[in-house]
Image (tube, rainbow, N blue to C red):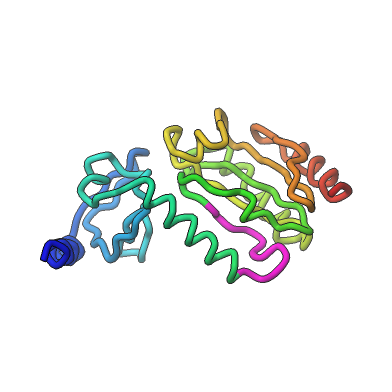
């Protein structure tokens, strides 16, 4: 009976329009929650549908939707595996966002046999917005390169602690065998290209 009551509460929540303010300050006004997933809520807005991850939301909102970090982490990992198994063999998608603040097993996302570039970024980071188009163009124009993007969301997320990120953008370059060749902090696209060339010739 408790489960039935929980479902009724969920559907009641889904039916009501609401406002959401992210910890970054971004606001979603008069939106409807169309779906609640373990790692976030899917919002229906006037302009379309957006997913907001619980790590982006204040603690009281997390509690309201019964957010559990451990369950969310498992769910995110399962979703990542699904995406990986449905991707084309080799590098899969040329460019893919693989985490929004949650811990991630980077080895599941390396395009073995090709060079993998991992970009740690955030939407609010100006230098990241400056570097990203160059990285994406490089990956889309070179079939030997796969770009995997990790949105840190904010400085308190699990993925920041996991990779000990102190400054963004940070770019890690892995060779064809999955070995880390080099790390570039800041907007230095030439250094990234240099590590990519090194990664192509090794591994």
Queried whether the magenta region covers residue 94, the answer comes back as yes
The N terminus appears in which quarter of the rendering?
bottom left
Q: In the picture shown, does residue 48 fall above or below 133? A: below
The residue at 21%/57% (across/down) is 30
Q: Which residues are magenta?
A: 87-98
Residue 90 seen by the camera? yes
Residue 192 in the image: x percent, y percent? 75, 41
In the image, residue 183 above or below residue 178: above
Quadrant in the rendering for residue 6: bottom left
User: In front here: 172 or 70?
Assistant: 70
Q: Is residue 117 above or below residue 96?
A: above
Residue 191: image x %, image y %? 77, 37
119 or 104, which is in the foreground?
104
Of 124 and 196, the residue lying toward us: 196
Q: Quadrant of residue 11?
A: bottom left
Q: In this orientation, does residue 16 appear?
A: no
Left or right side of 158 for 14 = left
Determine the residue located farthest toward the front in the rendered image.
1
Residue lying at 74% horizontally and 57% vertically, measured from the top left: 112
- Residue lying farthest top? 166
Find residue 18 and report its horizontal and vertical position in percent: 19, 55
**Is most of the magenta stretch helix, strand or loop?**
loop
- Say if the magenta span includes residue 41: no
Instruction: State the image quarter where residue 45 is shown.
Output: bottom left
Q: In this rendering, would 194 be left or right of 101?
A: right
Residue under the point 37% across and 53% down: 39
Task: Residue at 47% x, 48% y: name it.
Answer: 100
């Amino acid at each position: 009976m408790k489960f039935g009551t929980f479902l009724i509460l969920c559907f009641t929540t889904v039916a009501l329009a609401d406002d959401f303010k992210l910890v970054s300050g971004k606001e979603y006004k008069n939106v409807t929650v169309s779906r609640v997933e373990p790692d976030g809520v899917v919002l229906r807005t006037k302009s379309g549908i957006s997913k907001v991850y619980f790590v982006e939301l204040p603690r009281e909102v997390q509690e309201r939707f019964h957010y559990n970090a451990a369950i969310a982490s498992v769910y995110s990992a399962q979703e990542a595996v699904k995406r990986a198994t449905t991707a084309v063999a080799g590098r899969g998608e040329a460019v893919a966002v693989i985490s929004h603040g949650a811990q991630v097993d980077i080895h599941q996302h390396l395009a073995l046999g090709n060079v993998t570039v991992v970009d740690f970024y955030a939407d609010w980071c100006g230098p990241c917005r400056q570097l990203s188009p160059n990285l994406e163009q490089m990956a889309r124009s070179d079939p030997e390169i796969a770009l995997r993007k990790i949105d840190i969301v904010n400085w308190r997320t699990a993925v920041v602690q996991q990779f000990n990120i102190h400054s963004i953008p940070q770019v890690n370059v892995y060779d064809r065998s999955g070995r880390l060749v080099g790390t570039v902090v800041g907007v230095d696209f030439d250094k990234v290209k240099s590590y990519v060339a090194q990664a192509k010739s090794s591994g």
